[in-house]
């Protein structure tokens, strides 16, 4: 079994000051996924950095969800891909570039809910 890796790079800078010594991973989980365990205080700090406010129950849920996400990332890192180079290096098959007939503009205009000067008319979305 491989040694557990550091937290995802996107969270490393955020979590490092919270964990004390650089590289410290905090409490280890007891199950087979040896990832980080986000605490309520860490979730509160991340929420504050994101300018979000949560009550304690929501912080607990967020901490649990972030822990699951980071544990899943750690689990994905353990997948052996060295022998899958054949899949990674293969070229995507492309179809031939063939000219095909387009849609009849008159039929499109007849079926359009609103049409002006050869274009669809749609409601204004942005003021």
Image (cartoon, rainbow, N blue to C red):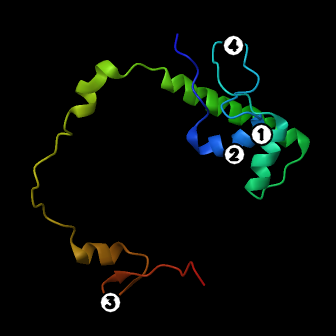
Helix or strand or loop: what does disc 2 sit on?
helix
**Cα distance, mark 4 to mark 1?**
23 Å
Q: Circle 3 is placed at which residue position?
A: 117
Sooner in the amino-acid sequence: mark 3 or mark 1: 1
Foreground disc of the pair 3, 2: 2
Q: In percent of the image, x 56 and y 30: which residue is there?
A: 73
Foreground disc of the pair 3, 1: 1
Asked if labels 1 and 2 touch by Cβ distance under 8 angstroms, the answer is: yes
Sooner in the amino-acid sequence: mark 3 or mark 4: 4
**Cα distance, mark 2 to mark 1?**
7 Å
Q: Circle 1 is placed at which residue position?
A: 18
As drawn, 107 above or below 33 = below
Q: In percent of the image, x 72 and y 18: which residue is there?
A: 29
Q: Nearer the viewer, residue 57 or 110?
A: 57
Asked if labels 4 and 3 touch by Cβ distance under 8 angstroms, the answer is: no
Q: Which mark is residue 14?
A: 2
Rate crowding at label 1 as few (under 14), some (14 to 19) or many (20 or more) other CA atoms within 10 Å.
Answer: some
**Cα distance, mark 3 to mark 1?**
61 Å
Helix or strand or loop: what does disc 1 sit on?
helix
Q: Nearer the viewer, residue 75 or 105?
A: 75
Foreground disc of the pair 4, 1: 1
Asked if labels 1 and 3 touch by Cβ distance under 8 angstroms, the answer is: no
**Cα distance, mark 2 to mark 4?**
25 Å
Sooner in the amino-acid sequence: mark 2 or mark 4: 2
Rate crowding at label 2 as few (under 14), some (14 to 19) or many (20 or more) other CA atoms within 10 Å.
Answer: some
Sooner in the amino-acid sequence: mark 4 or mark 1: 1
Foreground disc of the pair 2, 4: 2
- In the displayed orientation, state which residue is furthest to the right: 56
Q: In percent of the image, x 38 and y 75: which residue is there?
A: 112
């Amino acid at each position: 079994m491989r040694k557990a890796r550091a937290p995802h790079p996107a969270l490393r800078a955020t979590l490092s000051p919270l964990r004390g010594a650089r590289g410290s991973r905090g409490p280890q989980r007891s199950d087979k996924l040896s990832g980080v365990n986000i605490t309520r205080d860490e979730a509160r700090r991340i929420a504050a950095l994101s300018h979000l406010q949560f009550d304690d129950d929501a912080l607990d849920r967020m901490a649990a969800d972030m822990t699951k996400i980071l544990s899943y990332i750690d689990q994905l890192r353990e997948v052996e891909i060295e022998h899958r180079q054949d899949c990674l290096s293969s070229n995507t098959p492309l179809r031939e570039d063939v000219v095909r007939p387009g849609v009849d503009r008159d039929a499109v205009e007849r079926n359009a809910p609103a049409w002006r000067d050869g274009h669809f008319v749609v409601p204004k979305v942005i003021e």
